[in-house]
Every structure is written in C-alpha cells, then in structure tokens.
Amino acid sequence: MPDRPEPSRSLARYLVVLTAFTAAGLFILWKVSDAILLIFAGILFAAFLDAIARLLGEVLPWARGVRLAIVCVILGGVLLGAIAWGGTTIATQGNELAATLREQANHVLDWLRQYGIDVPQADAGAPAGQGAAAQAQDSMPTLRSVFPNVRGLFGPAWMAIAAVLGVLGDALVIIFLGLFLAVQPAIYRNAVLLLVPLKHRPRYREVLDESGETLRNWLLGQSLTMFIIFLCVWLGLTLVGVGPAFLLGLQAGLLAFVPTLGPFLAGIAIVLASLAGGLWGVIGALAVYLTVQTLESYFLTPMIQRRAISVPPAFLFASQITLGLLFGVYGLALATPLAAVGRVFILRLYVEDTLGDQTAKGYQTTTGDAT
C-alpha cells in the first residue's frame, strides 16, 4: 500500500492553497473595487428613491410604481429647474469662491513660512496646483480608467475635460442603476438569494430586508440633516456678510454626507473665505460654523439618526480612514452606509448564526441604542 502523506504535511499544503486563493480573491476584489463602489452607490440611490416613494405612500395610497414615477419626475424637475435657474450664477460664484480660497490659502501658507513652518509644495515639474489636481484625479475611482492616457495625448485642457466626463459618467451609471433597482427590487434580491443554499434563503432574505431598511432610514435622516445644515450655514453667513454664502452653505450641506471629516473640510473652506472680511468676518464665520456643528452634533444627529443606525462613532471614523486610503474619495463618502450594512450582516449572520450568541438581538441596527 502507498504511504499516506503525513497529517502535518497535508495541513501545510491545505494552508498554502487556502492562503493563495484568499490572496487572489483579495487582489481581484481590490482591482474591481471601483466598479463595486459604483454599484453600491447605485444601490444607495435606489434605496433613496424607495424611501421617498414609501413616504409618499403615507399621503397618496397609490400603486408603488405610480409613486416611484412621481418621485422621479419631481426630482428630475428640481434638478433641471436648478440648472436652468441658477446654473450660470452658481458657476460664476464657484469661480469666485475658488479664487478667494486659493488666494487666502496662499496668505495662510506665507504666514506659516514666516514662522519657520515648511509647507509641502505641489510637484515641481507641474504648474501650480496641477500636481494636487492630478493626484486627486488619479485617486478618484471613475469610468475614465478605460480611456487612454489623456494627460500625455492632449495636455492639461483635455485632462480637465476627461475628469468632467468621468464624473458625469459615474453619475449616469449611479442614476440608471438606481432606477433599475428601484423599479423591481424584489427581482434583484431574489437573484442574489439564488446563490444561497435553499435552507438558508429565508434567513438571508430577512437580513437583506433589514439592511435595506437600515439604508432607507439612514438616507432619510442624513438628507434632512444635510438640508438643515445647508439652510443654517447659508442664512448665517448671509447675516454676517461672508460670501458667497449660498455656495458655502451648499458645500457644507453636501460634505455633511461624510460624518466627522466632511464638516471639518467645510469649516476650512468657510474660514478661508471669511479671511477676506477681516477679523470680524472670521469671528462671524466661526460663530456660524460652531453653532451649526453644535446643532448637528447634539440635536440633529441624536434626534434624526437615533432611529436610523447605531454604529459607534469610533467605528465610523476608522471605516472612513480605511476606505478613504484604500479606495479614495468614493470609499470615504460611502464609508458610513457600508459600515451600517456591514454591521447588520456581522450581527445577524456571524454573531447570531455562526457563534450562536442570541444576545446580539438586543443590539438593534435600525432603532437606536441597545435595548
């Protein structure tokens, strides 16, 4: 009889094969991370449409397809109206704001150099500002990765056009994917369930439904928070005479989508823009910013998001740093909803089902603190 391999040698071979397959899987996942993040952004947009359609159902008890069509028409009309009404004005104010921020940032850098603080510069081989822009472009996961090297073929002007086209392409992918998913979500959920063994499908259906409910609750709460922040910053900066107040309020509201880091970046822009108004302008802008952040931290988030998700702040912050370093801007922006969904799957499928710890049922993912 042939000698059987020693158990230790078989175990070593098994570990080597398992490690190789794991490394290959992680490498493939990292290479297609751009597409995965775009798909998740589309799922997030679909959850937003579904959440608004459900809210509309409280007022109009019509068929879901009719309510979803009404929501899409309203959102499309608001977007087209905003572009037609304020597109030129916003573009002009955006250029003015960018010039103001650049000028004031240079003043701050000069002041720091006077006190011996060396500030890193952009790449020496590129024009001023182009090095940082190129770095940001390289780290942005967009569809333009399928195009040739535009930088080498056409120069900086075509680089800007490619960046705009890449962002617009991503936006179109997210919108159309979200629309397809929102129209018939059950079809896609059942398609995912086909990959699960038959006896486990009811449990996975519950977890998928719970994760969808978590996303809807978080999106509704976050949208309301973002709108209130935009309104408060806009009105507050208008009162203290810091302009352009509308764009500063808009960017503060949009950056509120990224907790912790977003408000910090918004505050930097507000302070830099207020430097042109002198000392009292800075004091007024700081007062507006700190008041809004206090309102958001101690009133809006606890009251609005308490029934949405209960992910610990340290876990959220660590998720933002990790995903931001790995996947760039999109990873940073989607860190919070990814952490919320991941928490549902970990609690339900690993802690409860694998470890058998049924006390995890007390940790509600959609109703706030532990009961």
Image (cartoon, grey):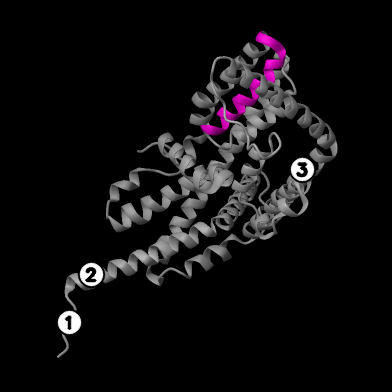
Disc 2 residue crowd, few under 14, some 14–19, many 20+, Cα 10 Å: few
State the residue in front, 84 or 200.
84
Q: CA distance from mark 1 to mark 3?
A: 71 Å
Local secondary structure at mark 2? helix
Query: Label 3 amino acid?
Result: Leu
Q: Give the percent coordinates (x, y) of residue 321.
A: 47, 40
Mark 1 touches mark 3? (CB < 8 Å): no
Q: How many marks?
A: 3
Q: CA distance from mark 2 to mark 3?
A: 60 Å
* Residue marked by disc 1: 4
Viewer-nearest of labels 2 and 3? 2
Residue 104 located left or right of residue 265: right
Q: Which residues are magenta?
A: 260-279
> Magenta span: helix, strand or loop, mainly?
helix
Q: Which mark is residue 173?
A: none
Query: Marks 2 and 1, Cα distance to the nearest angstrom?
Result: 13 Å
Mark 1 or 3, which is nearer the eye?
Answer: 1
User: Which quadrant holds residue 369?
Assistant: top left
- Residue 232 pos. (x, y %): 65, 23
Rendering coords of residue 262 (x, y %) = 57, 33
| Label 3: element kind | helix
Per the image, label 1 sits on a secondary structure element best described as loop
Quadrant the C terminus occupies: top left
Which residue corresponds to the image point at 49% horizontal and 24% vertical from the top-left? 298
Q: Residue 261 magenta-drawn?
A: yes
State whether residue 336 appears in this view.
yes
Q: Are marks 2 and 3 in contact (CB under 8 Å)?
A: no
Disc 2 residue type? Leu
> Residue 11 got which mark?
2
**Mark 3 — residue?**
79
Measured as percent of width and height from the top left, residue 276 is found at 72, 16
